Amino acid sequence: MKDKVCIITGASSGIGKALAFELANQKAKLVLAARNEKELQDIKSQLEKAGAEVFIIKTDVSIEADCKNLIEQTIATYGRIDVLINNAGLSMRALFEDVDLKVLKQLMDVNFWGTVYCTKYALPHLLQSKGSVTGVSSVAGYKGLPGRTGYSASKFAMQGFLEVLRIENLKKDLHVLIACPGFTASNIRNTALSSDGSQQGESPRDEDKMMTAAEVAKEIVKAIQKRKNTIVLTSQGKMTVTLNKFFPKFMDKMVYNHMAKEPNSPLK
């Protein structure tokens, strides 16, 4: 990854932040995008002390103009794009019958449209460099998770979009990776939206038993280097995806029971 120009959205925390440190270790040139400019500045300072080359830009991926600006600023700064990692994401926890539809729209705007916008404007440059597009998705993009309608829908949509992008560009050497981390110890659940759009706050899951963001970042970077099509992380995630192919009804019940065990689960 040495001297490769890598854009990471949602880079101010969690997997995005871990990706920044992992790629910096490999001497990549980084463009970090997120809404929280203060956090980005702090990360930039840490990375530059370690000798990394870092450019930050405040970006709300749900806004098309912000995504266009991100790509234009990257080209103005580095003249090329080698890797685009669409990592910015929002989660939610509420039953569909209870949720305000604005919550679903917000998740689609960030998780799906954010990926579409950034990829659309980066694509000509990625085709030129024969580069890589990555979407940080989820096992929820393979199996619908109860209480996560907007999240699953946005990840299914993201994966469908990226799969088509890969097939359309089969003869142009564009690499497209769909990365599905499974449950990861990051702040996405703390910032997950409840039925009315407010943040749920404390994560309902035991994060000590999950993969760390740093472990996930290493696997994603390795998959980009090997130009893999998909990765599904954690044994639980792999089992869910595999069993769902053959026993979907059984997995409906298993997933329901598993999610119902969460503290304060919306499932009755």
Image (tube, rainbow, N blue to C red):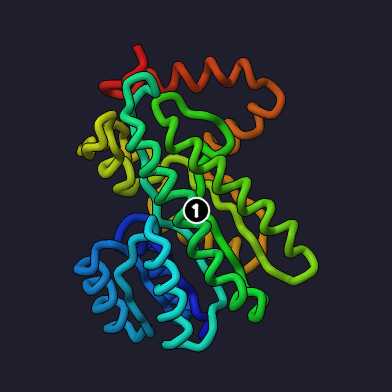
Three-letter code, disc 1? Val
Q: Quadrant of residue 51?
A: bottom left
Question: In the displayed structure, does residue 94 sit left or right of residue 198?
Answer: right
Point out residue 160 in the picture as x, y percentages from the top left corner.
Answer: 63, 46
Q: Position of residue 230 (x, y in %)?
A: 64, 52
Which residue position is annotated with label 1?
136
Front-most of residues 26 and 58: 58
User: Is residue 121 in view from this perspective?
Assistant: yes
Circle 1 SS class? strand
- Tell me how many marks there are: 1
Residue drawn 55% across and 48% down? Answer: 158
Q: Is residue 197 above or below residue 134?
A: above
Examine the rendered structure and indicate whether residue 74 appears above or below residue 224: below
The image shows residue 91 at horizontal and vertical percentages of 36, 41
Q: Quadrant of residue 57?
A: bottom left
Q: Quadrant of the C terminus?
A: top left
| Residue drawn at the location 20% of the way across and 38% of the way down | 201
Residue farthest to the right, as pictured: 171
Residue located at (26% from left, 76% from top): 46
Q: Residues within 10 Å of mark 1 (few under 14, many from 20)?
A: many
Observer-nearest residue: 174 or 17?
Answer: 174
On the image, the x and y values in percent for residue 37 come to: 23, 68
